[in-house]
Amino acid sequence: MPGIRSQLQFERESNNPPGKNATHAPFVGTIVPRQGTRRFAPPSLVLLTGGDDREWDEQFMPEPAHFECVVFFAHGFGDSILTLPALRALAHVFPRRSALICERDVFELLFWELKFPATFEVNIEVKDGVQWFDARVISQHVASCDLFVSLTPWHTPSVDQLIEALRPEKSIGFSPAFSEQLPLHTDEHSIDLAFSVPRYVDPTLRLDDFLHAPKLTPRATSSVTSLAIPVGPSTHLLTIHGDSKPDKMWPGASWSRFLNVFLASHPTYIALLVGLRDINIRSQMFPDRVFSYLGLPLSDTLALLAASDMFCGIDSVMLHAADLFRVPGVGLFGPTNPRVFGFRVAPHNHVWNTRGINHITVEDVCSACEDLVENIANTSQDGVEKTRGTRH
């Protein structure tokens, strides 16, 4: 299968050479935001459109441009981490005259590392369970494109309006609204599902080439190095994340009992609590070995997680980040499926109870962690991973 990229290239060369009968401006050179806009990526690579708090200097982009490929993704922090490999692949396939459409906070946390020549901002609002955004903001800067790619699993009238505004020759996504509809396999791991899109564009792409860890912002790295974490030469860091939607949370009392057992068995470990809310995780036996970093900016929390030796937590952005950081972990699952949202690349054990996460016992989690600690020790000795799996 030649892939849709080669098909588009053939059609452009055969039927419509670049510049012939063009009614829009080609994308040439760099696009930059107004002076003073803070970005972690080089400003010459980034353009964020829209927003009521800024005006744009028209000299940077006097009229809407034509792009070879426009990529759209907007679906939360956790899903953004799961989609990073796919976005990296698309930026690799289309290094010039391509653009990414995403939300600003996700860009500043994760997508700033991507090599798209231009990035455009959308503000997603959810009304009655439906995602809405103003496609007209994008059409002010993008006249048309050869290929439009949507990596979002949802499809709403706003996406239809965006497709209509961009007038792509071809479009790819998981909805019948796209000229090339891909199957939405709900039993496939989310990383693999997202990567099915760039692989459809270019079948030679290999997921492993794009599975590296998220790139941390310089500010986050600097902030974490300044934290007063009491570590010694033999100290191991266990990062714990427990807060989320109620049906995905394990009780604080269970976490506390687990900490007592785990820390008693592993005297070189200290526990770092991360997340937004205090769900009353305590260790009555070892209070001096449990440290709270609740409420840190998410960028700082990811940097802290990247420095950890082990992770234990629920289905969340923290688990997905630990996976790509290759931090060995234990994931606790109830309503969601670990085969879809669990660890994908790091050494791991999953503890899954389909009756609900409250039915997971402390003994289940302790056993999974003990197996993982042994796995880590075996791996450090011979470099071969011994165990990983999902427990029911």
Image (spheres, rainbow, N blue to C red):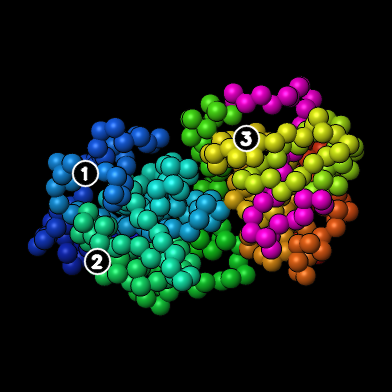
Name the amino acid, label 1: Trp
Structural distance between the alpha carbons of marks 3 and 1: 36 Å
Locate residue 373: give its quadrant: top right
| Residue 375, numbered circle | none
Name the amino acid, label 2: Ala
User: Circle 2 is placed at which residue position?
Assistant: 165
Magenta region: which residues?
Answer: 225-254
- Identify the residue at image location x=86%, y=47%: 257
Q: Which callout, 2 or 1, points at the residue further toward the start of the chain?
A: 1
| Residue 304, numbered circle | 3
Structural distance between the alpha carbons of marks 3 and 2: 42 Å
Q: Indicate whether 105 appears above or below 334.
A: above
Closer-to-camera residue (318/247):
247
Closer-to-camera residue (323/361):
361
Q: Please name which of the two marks, 3 or 1, marks the residue nearer to the observer.
A: 1
Q: Residues within 10 Å of mark 3 (few under 14, many from 20)?
A: many
Is residue 56 among the parts visible in the rendering?
A: yes
Query: What kind of element bears circle 2?
Result: helix
Q: Indicate whether 7 appears above or below 306.
A: below
Structural distance between the alpha carbons of marks 2 and 1: 21 Å
